[in-house]
Image (tube, rainbow, N blue to C red):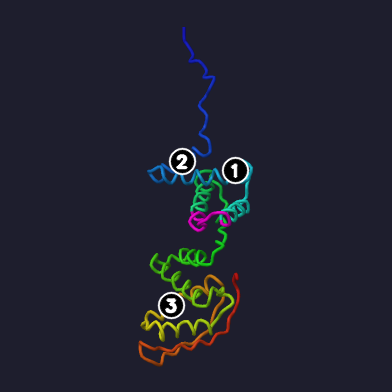
Amino acid sequence: MSTQPPNNPNPPQPPRLLDLVRQIAFQRFGQPGPGERHAHWAHRFILFHDKRHPRDLLPADVGRFLEHVAHTEKDPLPCLEQAHTALTFLYHDVLGLNVGELPFPDPPRLLDRLRRACRVRQLSPNTEDCYAMWAERFIRCHHLRHPNTMGAPEIEWFLTDLAAKGHVSASTQNQALNALLFLYQHVLGIEFFWLVAVSASLASPEFRLHAQPRRGGRG
């Protein structure tokens, strides 16, 4: 008499979504750290949207969550980058949904926006730190005025002051100029059509900026 295996009254359940995130991430990266980070941000995303399944949410819903992260985290830029990476992984690698490029909101702090612009353009960490340092020095030199309220005269004054009082070299002065041009062009969306004339020694170069700002970005 043949015997049939009994039906399993409790068939194995598929892994829960967050466990699936951890499992696929471990297969991808070979260590638990990335999976835990991705699961953390996926969990926060789901809770933010009242426990709705991510399949039922749209990229605009991702954008609203990331805006919330940007304005509530003490150090928003690394949190935004982690959350964006985690949700991209969730939709593309775990759920297999083609939702395109997920939105990435601007961090609220100007220097974080500068750092983000450097990373998008794959500039080196040293260049990023250098540009952020010069942008901060420029802002502090002008008593914390926002750069979008300043332009070529303030840039020229700052560069001249570096040479006259700081006795910096021409290469250092040029480095500061490049940082400020990057800030205005790629962060604030303001382009300066300028000419530079150097008519002195390295100890005292003179810059003449003739600016016609074209505003096309965010303030």
Mark 3: give few (<14), some (14-19) or many (20+) Cα within 10 Å. many
Residue 21, image x, y percentages: 49, 41
Q: Is residue 209 left or right of residue 31?
A: right
Q: Which mark is residue 29?
A: none
- Secondary element at image label 1: helix
Vertical comparison of 116 with 141: above or below: above
Q: Which mark is residue 22?
A: 2
Question: Which region shows up in magenta?
Answer: 70-81
Mark 2 or mark 3, which is nearer to you? 3
Vertical comparison of 104 with 160: above or below: above
Inspect the image, locate mark 3, and give the three-letter code of the amino acid beneath it.
Answer: Ala
The residue sitting at 63% across, 45% down in the picture is: 49
Inspect the image, locate mark 1, and give the three-letter code of the amino acid beneath it.
Answer: Leu
- Secondary element at image label 3: helix
- For mark 1, what is the residue? 47
The residue sitting at 53% across, 70% down in the picture is: 187
Q: How many marks?
A: 3
Q: Which mark is residue 176?
A: 3
Q: Is residue 76 in the magenta section?
A: yes
Mark 1 or mark 2, which is nearer to you? 1
- In three-dimensional space, the C-alpha distance between marks 1 and 2, rounded to whole angstroms, equals 18 Å
Residue 112, image x, y percentages: 50, 64
Task: Name the N-terminal-most of marks 1 and 2.
Answer: 2
The residue sitting at 51% across, 34% down in the picture is: 15
The foreground one among 205 and 4 is 205
Task: Name the N-terminal-most of marks 1 and 3.
Answer: 1
- In three-dimensional space, the C-alpha distance between marks 1 and 3, rounded to whole angstroms, equals 44 Å
